[in-house]
Amino acid sequence: MSVFMIFRIAFKSLGRNKLRTALTMLGMIIGVAAVITVVALGQGAQESIETQIRAAGTNLITVNAGNFNMGGVRQGQGASNTLTVEDSRAIRHEILGVQFLAPGVNTRAQVIAGNQNWQTRIQGTDVDLPLIRAWPAKYGGFFTPQDVSSAAKVAVLGGVVTETLFGEEVDPVGQIIRIRNQPFKVVGVMTKKGQAAMGEDQDDAIFVPYTTVQKKLSGQQHINNITISAQSANQVGNTADQIAMLLRSRHNLLPGDTDDFMVRTLEEMASVRSEATKTMRALLASIAGVSLVVGGIGIMNIMLVSVTERTREIGLRLAIGARGSDVLLQFLVEAVALSLVGGAFGIGLGFGVSNGLTRVLEWPTFVSPDAVAVAFGVAAATGVFFGFYPARKASGLDPIEALRYE
Amino acid sequence: MHVSTMPVIATQDLVKTYHLGEVQVRALRGVTVSLDPGEFVAVTGPSGSGKSTFMHILGCLDRPTSGKYFLEGRDVSRLSKDELAAIRNRKIGFVFQGFNLLPRTTALENVELPMLYNGGVRTAERHKRARAALEAVGLADRTAHYPNQLSGGQQQRVAIARALVSSPSIILADEPTGNLDSRTSVEVMDIFQMLNIEHSLTVILITHEHDIAEYATRIITFRDGRIVQDRPADSRRIAKRELAAMPVEESV
């Protein structure tokens, strides 16, 4: 019997009981749709992380004071006073791969402008920061090297801060704001950049010269971090290693001592986030996979019922010359047809749900062709796997017994 | 002994023993018989006489425990399952008591069924042969009907057409009138007699009803797994004549 004939017979017998066929398929449809949707969500999350990483700046290296694992006392990054302005100067002058560099001194403060006030991050930094982060100003510009050397009271506002203090679409350049009761002149406003790779809102900050923070605001001599960009992408790793070596020798660390700083590249930070989403994705995908198995069991169940119901039909087919293998193939193809058609509908539904999630909840989703191919393949495999037992049962029937079956 | 054509069926000392746990059931205890082409044979006997087992072996649905069975001169008693399936497909046409038509499948498609398992028959050829078979049983105008739209007699005629369609060596009819009323039974027997006479088809009719057996040309009686009587039908009933004599009814 030709393959075409076998498929025709299978679809015909599935067509004889449409409601049951549809209900059996439903299990498959839901299973496949769940897998497609979950994978699409995972892919979407991955893509959006990558977009954020790219937005953070290219070839980025950060050095934070202190280390998670330093001594017995675990401290947050940037909390210790192991980094100095001299360290950052040494890095700038001694390491060739460094393109831009900005020491960072952070504090938090209440900011007042007119009758508005806002608690935000005060980020002391250097003139290189917009270059490192590829971050243009919306109004005005960044502060100048003269501002840094004179520890001038000038401020560049993040998008969120501007909107809170002055309102949307207002150019506040030239206005005076008060930080810890000291007047600062607004010289610029940054464009909005959104969430950073580690989750903080980059627009909820005020940028001032790091010297200003040290001398006028917090009084601290050490710096919290250094933001660096390497000259090219393939120099990032090498440059990071050289920075670590330089700092170890400057801090007089012996071999075997733990670093009292942390040098990290953007790739590392990205991979931490990806690991987390990967775990989540695997968990969700396995839950979706379970529903696929349940769908498969549904098919097996209905095929077993169908074999029992059609015992006389099987007996007749055997009597008029069907071989055991013909009957096996017929029932196997029926099961595979159920799972494949169900799988096809499931892929459609998965597409729809993914799009709906993106549209209504604004969750990023991406249905990859790979996921569709895998889902379809798994659906077919499920059909074969769960269809085989009932089909073998059918093909093993004794024609005499089967013909007598009431 | 005159020179005759080769018998279509010849058995030598057929024995069939079933093992039901500890108990041995000797369904056939040595059956030797020979049937010529074109014979219309009725096999009768009470239930448990072994006639059903005999039919299963003749129909290649079962194999004898010992003894030999020649179908058109070929020993088929030791063939494999798949070989038997091929023999059933090409050499044997079955007609059952319960019609065994596929539901929700047209008469034409039901008749085409055996040809689906016979490799090389093309679709056009299949339709043509199935139509011819339905015509032969007088159902040319019912090809597109579903079984549930046909009367019992018509359904059995579809089943006969299905048995005919691959031009088998023998037609095996197992209680074909068991589910039919008497008039319809006569109609069905008329079809068998017509096929036997006009198409010289060999028909083997298994029945426990003596009056139905009388439509055959030869009656073989089984008892306790043996043939106890093998005689020509001395007062053969002719279905066509009986139908003509019956009062005209609206067919159901």
Image (tube, rainbow, N blue to C red):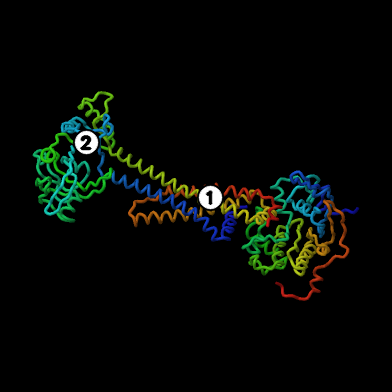
Tag 2 subunit: A
- Residue located beneath label 2 in the image: A79
Q: Same chain for the residues at labels 1 and 2, yes or no?
A: yes
Which of the pair B112/A184 is nearer the observer? Answer: A184
Q: Secondary structure at mark 2?
A: loop
The residue positioned farthest toward the right in the image shown: B1
Q: Is residue A231 visible in this depiction of the protein?
A: no
Residue B48: quadrant of the picture: bottom right
- Above-or-below relation of A182 to B142: above
Give how far across and how far down residue B65 sits, in percent. 78, 45
Residue B38: quadrant of the picture: bottom right
Say which of marks 1 and 2 sits in front.
2
Give how far across and how far down residue A306 sits, in percent. 60, 55
The residue at 21%/31% (across/down) is A95
Horizontally, is B194 left or right of B132 in the view?
right
Q: Quadrant of the C terminus of chain A?
A: bottom right
Q: Amino acid at mark 1?
A: Ile
Q: Amino acid at mark 2?
A: Ala
Which of the pair A99/A210 is nearer the observer? Answer: A210
- Residue located beneath label 1 in the image: A297
The residue at 65%/63% (across/down) is B108
Residue A217: quadrant of the picture: top left
Q: Is residue A32 visible in this depiction of the protein?
A: yes
Q: Residues within 10 Å of mark 2 (few under 14, many from 20)?
A: some
Tag 1 subunit: A
